[in-house]
Image: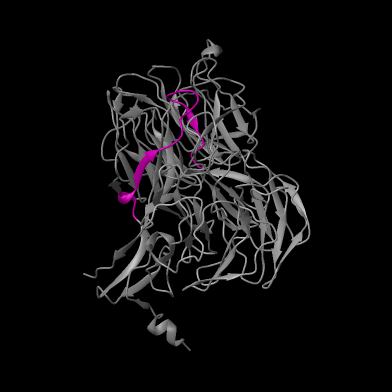
Amino acid sequence: MSKYKEIKGFKVQTLASDTAASVAASGSWSAGGALNTGRENVGPAGVGPQTAALAVGGYTTTHVNNVEQYNGTAWSEIAEINTARYGNASSTSGTTTAAITVGGNVSPKLQVESWNGSSWTEITEVNSVKEYSGSAGTSTAMIVGGGSPRNTNTETWNGSAWTEVNELNTARYAMGTFGITTAALFTGGDKGPPSPPVTGATEVWDGSSWTEVNDMNTVKQYLGGAGTTTDGLAFGTSGPNSAKTEAWDGTNWTEVADLATGRYAFASAAGSGSAAWAAGGTPQITATEEWTTTPAANLTKINLGQVYYNSGSNAFKVTQQSPPTGTWSSGGTLNTGRSRFGGASNATQTAGLVFGAGGSPYGQTEEYNGTAWSEQNDLNTGRYISYGGGGTQTACITAGGYNPAGSPVYATVVAEVYNGTSWTEVNDLNEGRLDCATFGSSTAALLVGGGEGPGGPNTVASVESWNGTSWTETTDIPTSRQEMGGWGIQTAGAIVGGTKDTGPTVVNKVYEWNGSTWSEGGDYPSVVKYTTAFGSATAAVVAGGENVTVKIATSASYNGATWSTNNSLSEAKMGISGNGSSTSGFVAGGENQAGSTLTATEEWTVPEANKTITVS
């Protein structure tokens, strides 16, 4: 018997307003109750959410031991801490009956006090000085890191003892922080020389180590923070007092509604981006502000593919990522400028890899963490005029390319695998080639077409498949070509553009691969060579290249059948290398129309958005 839901379908939620890509990003600040004692340097962190919070210590004309509790409407004075202090860290996700405060400008600066709802008790001291440190967590599971004088020391608390753990990547103090002891985020702060001392650098803690992620849009110090590692806020700063607020969605920072009052060195906390608060600050402010989000309470964040009925606009809507809405933004700078080089096309925007070219001996390798590039061990055989690479930042294969030191065999047969640390030579290709396309993984890759010599007419149609041990010749592409872009995995990929042997002629043809045969796909909007591509067989991005002799900034997305035009790169260039997916990736390096070799990185991001469903 058929079920009712199978016949009638599922209930769709009715909402008065649209969902938001981020809970935090959808809100605004409003006035709350005033502190009884205006003060600065209270914190830099407070305790608890908007309706059950604590502000501990601070500075008026001297250190204070005042503690106030907030119920969402008014602050009331409660039992004082035993030792007056300011610049102390607190358990941001603690409660009004269970919290701790750590260090600060107090002697000795190792002091820790615990709150049980009625009184404060001195407990086990931290191992290293903690003043203006970052903190996150509860009274029994807390992380504290950095501080003044600038340091990277990090410790965790399990309710009875402090343990030193892996250090922050950047020494700093006066940060904005939020999260829990196994998933915390520290951002901004004063990192000292070299100039500028104030930073927007952001690091995420996963319970064992810190990872650098995307910076804030505006550098900040003595700021506030609230939320989780996937949905948070950073707000306020000094020099001059700022009201700027930024929302974190787990990948990027976005500027949102400002505080009403610019401030710094204030108390703030919340376990979610929808319950943030800010109280006190310089110059000895009493005002409190509360962050309120606007989406419907029962569906406050976009989930890709969700369908709902918007009762305000009388329309059905679906949430999606539409490639034409994607944008390119500036990223980190390569240490070595390069063009016509390799990259791990299936790596990510925050864990990328490029290699080759860059000047003799042409083996330079760099890794990207979403913010900055770092030099790694070189290829064993330097090369350039080699496109793509099968795999990720920690598992990638490259083969072929132009090896200037290999005369008379310029088009090399050498293949190498990268393990995240170094390159190892593996079994050779059956046929040496350069200007080929490579995609897939380090154990299952496909190498397509190419040329037999630099600038020569001997373009090939042959294709080789890698199984983790050896290369095997497989089905040729329909027409020989080189200088094309390629994307996908070993059993589902495609190539675009390139130069045919006859002419030679630059083409716009797409050939799709299903694991055994090639078929013609939708033509690219223009003829192109020396382009780059990344993504899957049915969701890919192509960017840059050369239209015969003119460099182009064009970018387009492919859905497996047709192309849609994206926003263009900031500069026309060819010979770039790309990593990522159809909604999150980057391109790096290349050569511009003037012939200059570039170091710039441009990051590709497609936002989540709501689209009205129309029926025709």
Can residue 582 be seen from the camera position used here? no
* Residue range (magenta): 322-346
Dividing the picture into quadrants, the one containing residue 364 is top right
Q: Magenta segment: does it hold 326?
A: yes
Q: Quadrant of residue 13?
A: bottom left
Residue 156 position in % (x across, y down): 71, 53
Can you give x and y, in whole percent of width and height, for residue 567 in the image?
29, 43
- Identify the residue at horizontal 26%, vertical 75% (top origin): 312
Q: Is residue 111 above or below residue 115?
A: above
Q: Quadrant of residue 140?
A: bottom right
Residue 61 vs residue 419, the one in the foreground: 61
* Residue 549 or residue 172, whichever sits in front: 172
Decide which of 41, 260 is in the foreground and name it: 41
State whether residue 351 is above or below residue 42: above
Up-down: is 561 above or below 474? below
Q: Residue furthest top?
A: 408
Q: Is residue 271 visible?
A: yes
Work out which residue is located at the far front of the displayed protein and give it.
61
The quarter in which the C terminus is drawn is bottom left
